[in-house]
Image: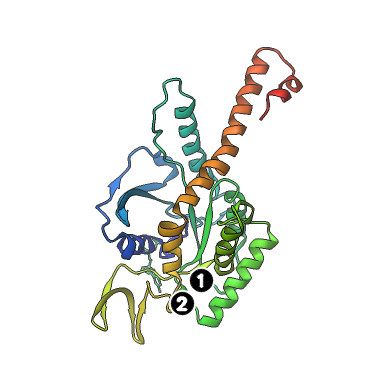
Amino acid sequence: MNKRSGLGKSTLMNTLFKSKVSRKSVQATSQEKIPKTIDIKSVSHDIEEKGVRMKLTVIDTPGFGDQINNENCWQPIMKFINAQYEQYLQEEININRKKRIPDSRVHCCIYFIPPTGHCLRPLDVEFMRRLSKVVNIVPVIAKADTLTLEERDFFKQKIREELQANGIDVYPQKEFDDDAEDRMINDKIREMIPFAVVGSDQEYQVNGRRLLGRKTKWGTIEVENIAHCEFAYLRDLLIRTHMENIKDITSSIHYEVYRVRRLNENNTAVAHANGLPQHHMTSHEM
Ligand code: GDP
């Protein structure tokens, strides 16, 4: 999860946990393990979807992009993601490894784009360009209710063009489509990305039903109504339709890249320690 302050990120996460699929959300438990220096906070929720209980951990990056110089603000987040891969790797290569390795790997990064209506900022491009190589990125337009429908469509189109022009491959990545059916479903999602979302943790009575919404002078924006915004698409993608795939890609692509790189580093280090020149190692490389 990533954002600048005030983009509605906390609100959207509350919306996610309060919305229909996850109404049974049990109270959150804070995790202690995260190093404080990075200022990244993590909260776990138990949610239930179609009778299946699961733990969903949301990691917050307060203050992202708030500095005067935002050049390297992707770094602590990259570091955090790699630290989770490293932890998993260490468990995995342990001689007495556990049957079920505790998995704190980051499976998805929701990137909040401010609703400027113009184009991506250099910070957005830099962040997504770098992070899309290590984690699944799902970009969203924050506070989409501040844009008119025309502005929204224009902005979405513009962002898609910019992502492509900068070679940024966000989730669901085309190259990882499994088959023709997968491609068809994912093409539809790719045409809609970034989702223009509105968040709210307030419930209102609309036509006799209680709905999550934002009440304005002109009416209530129903956040789960696809005629009002694209929150429901995001929720379905994350929790209902693509959760397994998001985890699979993390494990088989992103983590694998990390694992291979780290094990190669180790081989090279061992080779150096044994006084072997580096080219002897090539046959051992994966
Ligand atoms: P965070 O700092 O990114 O976690 O932002 P918050 O969730 O704390 O929200 C900051 C402010 O924006 C609060 O006053 C929210 O009520 C408001 N807000 C959150 N989501 C939306 C939204 O979708 N649309 C609008 N217009 N305001 C929002």
- The kind of residue tagged 1 is Pro
Percent of width and height locating residue 8: 40, 65
Task: State the residue in front, 151 or 177.
Answer: 177
Q: Position of residue 102 (x, y in %)?
A: 39, 35
Determine the image quadrant of residue 161: bottom right
Q: Amino acid at mark 2?
A: Thr
Above or below, 216 relative to 194: below
Residue 19 in sight from this viewpoint: no
Q: Which residue is mark 2?
A: 146
The quadrant the N terminus occupies is bottom left
Farthest residue toward the bottom? 218
Q: Quadrant of residue 267?
A: top right
Q: Position of residue 258 (x, y in %)?
A: 57, 37
On the image, numbered disc 1 is attached to which residue? 115
Query: Residue at (58%, 54%) from the top-left corner?
Result: 127
Q: At 72% across and 15% down in the image, what residue appears?
A: 276
Q: Are marks 2 and 1 in contact (CB under 8 Å)?
A: yes
Q: Nearer the viewer, residue 176 or 103?
A: 176
Whether the residue under disc 2 has CB within 8 Å of ligand 1:
yes
| First of labels 2, 1 by sequence position | 1
Q: Is residue 229 left or right of residue 172?
A: left
Applied colour scheme: rainbow
Q: Looking at the image, in which quadrant does ligand 1 appear?
A: bottom left
Residue 9 or residue 52, whichever sits in front? 52
